[in-house]
Amino acid sequence: MPKTQDPIISVSGVRGQVGVSLDMRTITRFALAFGTFVGGKTVVVGRDTRTSSPMIRHAVLAGLFATGCKVIDVGLCPTPTVLLTAKTLDAQGSITITASHNPVEWNGIEFASESGRLLTQTEREELTHIYETEEFALSTWNKLGTFEVYEDAVNHHLKHIHNLPWLDLDLIQSTKLKVALDCGNGAGCVISPILLRELGCDVVEVNCVPDGNFNRSAEPTPDALSELCQTVCDTGADIGFAHDGDADRVVIVTDCGTALSGEWTLAIVADFILQKKKGDIVATVSTSRMLDDIAEKHGAMLHRTKVGVGWVVEKMHEVNAVIGGEGTGGIIYPSINHTTDGITSIAAIVQHLVESKSTLSDLVESMPKYEMCRKKLEIPSQTVATQLVELALEMYKKEVRTTGTGERTFNLELTDGIKRAWEDRWVNIRKSGTEPVIRVFSEAPSESEAEMLCDETLKNLKMLMKQINLK
């Protein structure tokens, strides 16, 4: 992965490679900005298992103390647990130290405002302005911040899950499922094994040591889950689950040992939740067409947004959606909190599996099917990425032609990046908000067609990249 000297600032927060594009001056400066943003009030702080997280924690605390904040430290916790704790304690903000699904050499901080709510676009702009202008509200020696530890965050999260109206503990416990669980040695280690055992499951643990030494990619893509797939087959497990680094996502392995993409997590959960409660769904522009079919099945309205949890959450608030998420395996449950929650997803999928009285393979077989392809192009910087997307837009605008019948060759959608959509397929290119890459996602009736669409798009991007290099 190309190294960049600037951290990536996006809807997801601030991320970078530790000691390369992310240093402690940047972290403290952002903590000073956030302490100023919340008016020196109460901030909940938590971290994932990355070996750099304790160091970053100290830099965060320095900035918060300097602006007079009362810090409540929940320690090692998944991101959704941190935000739910902030909601429970009625804090004015929270900072989670994590790089989520990024590689182990990365880290960062994610922000939420009052009561565990993700920052709106206006709030993100305000925070960035304070950071850039360094207009910090520093406290005097006798009004510096305070510190306390809160040890009940995990138990509180588990209690909320147990109280969900669609969760039938007696039914699940009587079924005695065997579940293989791969936490990637990330933050999910401290909660998901406990949840599954409380649900009466026989748990087979894989990579459930919270030491931050990732034995696989922090992003739980199917290619990274060979060990979990083998474990499911060897132990005869009914299902396998895999988290990313901070457990805001979860993906599934079937009883046949087949790893599914995160698209299936959202599709299966949406189908289950909409059986329980009528309402709208919100997803991103690059999420599978399976959701269109599921929405139609349940008479629901599907709304699509830019990629990024913050955008999905804003739209969910606007339309009062009952479920939302991204095709990464990150699902948002408004009845818990408006943030992606991989732990609650485990409970939802287990409940759905038990209620259906079928195998996970049978559930998958009954769902609408499309094939997706995901690839990425590494780029030197975010500036180059912006130029590349602009050049691609110019090219594709010229390619849109009207036939004699008045029909377009494809529709050009610009909600997020560039999406070319035909009747039975689509391809989307956009700048990543978390890595120095251009992401290319495509979907078509067959795997070969989806990959061909992806490869053709990458070929065009590489050609346009040469034009940038020549300038």
Image: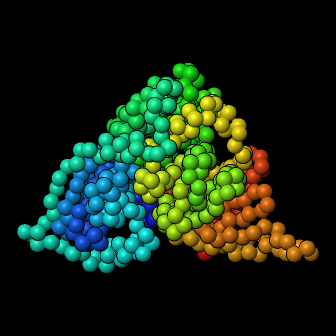
Q: Is residue 371 above or below residue 179?
A: below
> In this orientation, does residue 56 appear?
no
Residue 117 shown left or right of residue 388 in the figure: left
Residue at x 32%, y 76% (from the top left corner):
130
Residue at x 75%, y 57% (from the top left corner):
425
Residue 45 locus on image (x, y percent): 28, 55
Residue at x 44%, y 61% (from the top left corner):
12
Q: Is residue 178 above or below residue 261?
A: above
Residue 119 locus on image (x, y percent): 40, 67
Q: Nearer the viewer, residue 299 or 367?
A: 299
Displayed quadrant of residue 25:
bottom left
Way the structure is coloured = rainbow
Displayed quadrant of residue 360:
top right
Q: Nearer the viewer, residue 291 or 327?
A: 291
Question: On the rendered image, what quadrant is the C terminus found in?
Answer: bottom right
Q: Is residue 395 above or below residue 216?
A: below
Q: Nearer the viewer, residue 312 or 24?
A: 312
Residue at x 49%, y 62% (from the top left corner):
313
Residue 199 locus on image (x, y percent): 43, 32
